[in-house]
Image (cartoon, coloured by chain):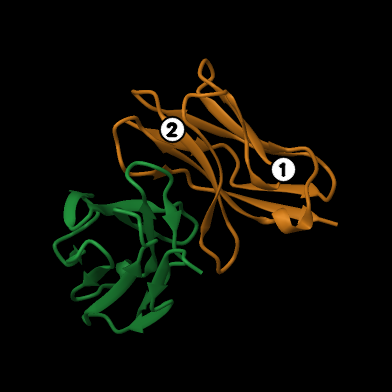
Amino acid sequence: DTGVSQNPRHKITKRGQNVTFRCDPISEHNRLYWYRQTLGQGPEFLTYFQNEAQLEKSRLLSDRFSAERPKGSFSTLEIQRTEQGDSAMYLCASSLAADTQYFGPGTRLTVL
Amino acid sequence: AQSVTQLDSHVSVSEGTPVLLRCNYSSSYSPSLFWYVQHPNKGLQLLLKYTSAATLVKGINGFEAEFKKSETSFHLTKPSAHMSDAAEYFCVVSPFGYNKLIFGAGTRLAVHP
C-alpha cells in the first residue's frame, strides 16, 4: 500500500511529557499537511510544508508544537509539555502541488 | 472569511432510501469544494470534488453533489442508501489560492435495515 502512513496509531502519555508523531506521505507528493481533530468536530488545519519548507502555520499551533520535514519526505510533529487539551486525533495529508489531499489514518493522542 | 456549515449533525435513513446531506459554504473567492467520508478507525477518504467545472459532480459509491452558487450550497446525495454508507461525512472548502482545507463539523449518517 503506497498511501499516507502515520506512526504511532495510538499514544497515551502523562501531562507534561513530550510526544513525537511521524508521517510518511505518498512518495511523489511534495506537499504535506497536519490537521487536528477533536471529538465530534471536523479536522482543523495546523500547518503545511512544500518540500522541506514550512509555509503556513495556524494560530492553533502554539509554541509547544513544532513540525519538521527535514528532507522533504517524512515529517514529524512534536508536542512539548503536553496538556490534557492536546488530546485529539492528529491527521497527516499529502498532495501533489495544490491537488487533492490524501489523508493518513491518524495518530490518536490521549493525555492523562 | 471562509467557512462551512453542515446543517444536520445526524441523519438516519433506511436501507434503499435516498440520502441527502446538506452543506452551505461561505467563501470570498471561487472555492474548491469537497466531500470526505470517515469510517470508524479509518482515514478520511475523498468522495468527490468540485473545482469550477460541471456543477453536478459524481463521486465514488454512487454519491453525487450539486454546486449551487446562488444558494452557496453543495449538498451530497445518493439515490439508494447501503448499510456500508454508515459513516461520518465532512463537507470541505478550499478557497482559491489557499492550501488548507476548511472542514465542516460533520454529519453522522446512520443506515437502518
Disc number placed over residue B105 in the picture, else none: none
Left or right? Give the position of B15 relative to A32: right
Please give the name of the residue rendered at 36% of the width and 62% of the height, measured from the top-left corner: A27
Of all chains in the rendering, the one displayed in green is A
Left or right? Give the position of B82 relative to B100: right
Q: Are discs 2 and 1 less than 8 Å apart at CB?
A: no
Query: Residue B102: percent from the left, percent from the top?
Result: 39, 42
Left or right? Give the position of B9 relative to A18: right
Give neighbour class at mark 1: few <14, some 14-19, many 20+ (Cα, 10 Å). few
Kind of residue at badge 2: Ser
Query: Residue A49: percent from the left, percent from the top?
Result: 23, 54
**Mark 2 falls on what kind of element?**
strand
Mark yes or no: residue B107 visible: yes
Disc number placed over residue B62 in the picture, else none: 1
Kind of residue at badge 1: Gly
Q: Chain letter of disc 1?
A: B
| Residue A28 figure quarter | bottom left
Please give the name of the residue rendered at 18% of the width and 74% of the height, measured from the top-left corner: A80
Determine whether A45 is above or below B19 in the image: below
Please give the name of the residue rendered at 29% of the width and 84% of the height, measured from the top-left corner: A14
Q: The C terminus of chain B lies in which quarter of the figure? A: bottom right
Please give the name of the residue rendered at 48% of the width and 47% of the height, measured from the top-left corner: B105
- Cα distance between the residues tagged 2 and 1: 21 Å
Query: Residue A7: percent from the left, percent from the top?
Result: 38, 76
Query: Which colour represents chain B?
Result: orange
